[in-house]
Image: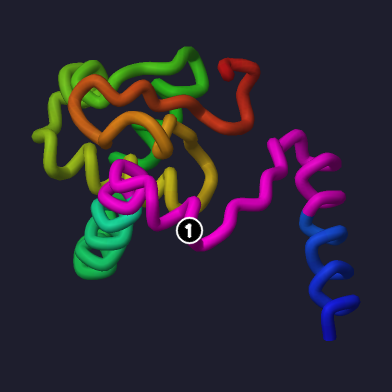
Amino acid sequence: STSLSFYGLNIAEEWCRQNDYTYSLISNEGIYANETYLENLETIITAVELLQKHFDLALQHELLQLLTLEQRTLQQLCKLTNRNRVEVQRMICWLLYTGVCTTDLLVTPINDQSLIRYALSGHQ
């Protein structure tokens, strides 16, 4: 079933190319070697689980309006929305999880200085 695996990888690579995403294949060793990435994934998953109980659609809309204008730090988004850090970070984690927004999860821990970008805008 190796050919089936290569077929799936080719489909993923082609989808990334068509949708303007960078395609890369990382081994399990590469993933588990990056503690920052693993901690960021844990933060995102925890936030997504907590949002299941209270999803603030108004906050999501407000953040997306701000991020379509320009990329901003988590700290800036808290000030602009006049919301507390926990609420904003959880919603940003949701937007990262769904691929609507991006940040550098491989290098920088999610914190007040994380630069958040709307994935569908020209701000990369």
**Residue beneath label 1, please?**
29
Instruction: Report the residue at 44% width, 52% height from top.
Output: 97
Is residue 15 located in the magenta-colored stretch of the structure? Answer: yes
Total label count? 1
Main SS of the magenta segment? helix
At label 1, the amino acid type is Glu
Instruction: Report the residue at 46% width, 54% height from top.
Output: 31
Task: Name which quarter of the figure residue 55 lies in.
Answer: bottom left
Task: Name which quarter of the figure residue 46 lies in.
Answer: bottom left
Name the secondary structure under disc 1.
helix
* Percent of width and height locating residue 91: 30, 45
66 relative to 59, above or below: above
Q: Quadrant of the C terminus?
A: top right
* Percent of width and height locating residue 114: 30, 25
Please name whichever residue, 62 or 20, is drawn nearer the observer in this view of the structure. 20
Task: Name which quarter of the figure residue 123 lies in.
Answer: top right
Please name whichever residue, 113 or 9, is drawn nearer the observer in this view of the structure. 9
Q: Is residue 53 left or right of residue 118?
A: left
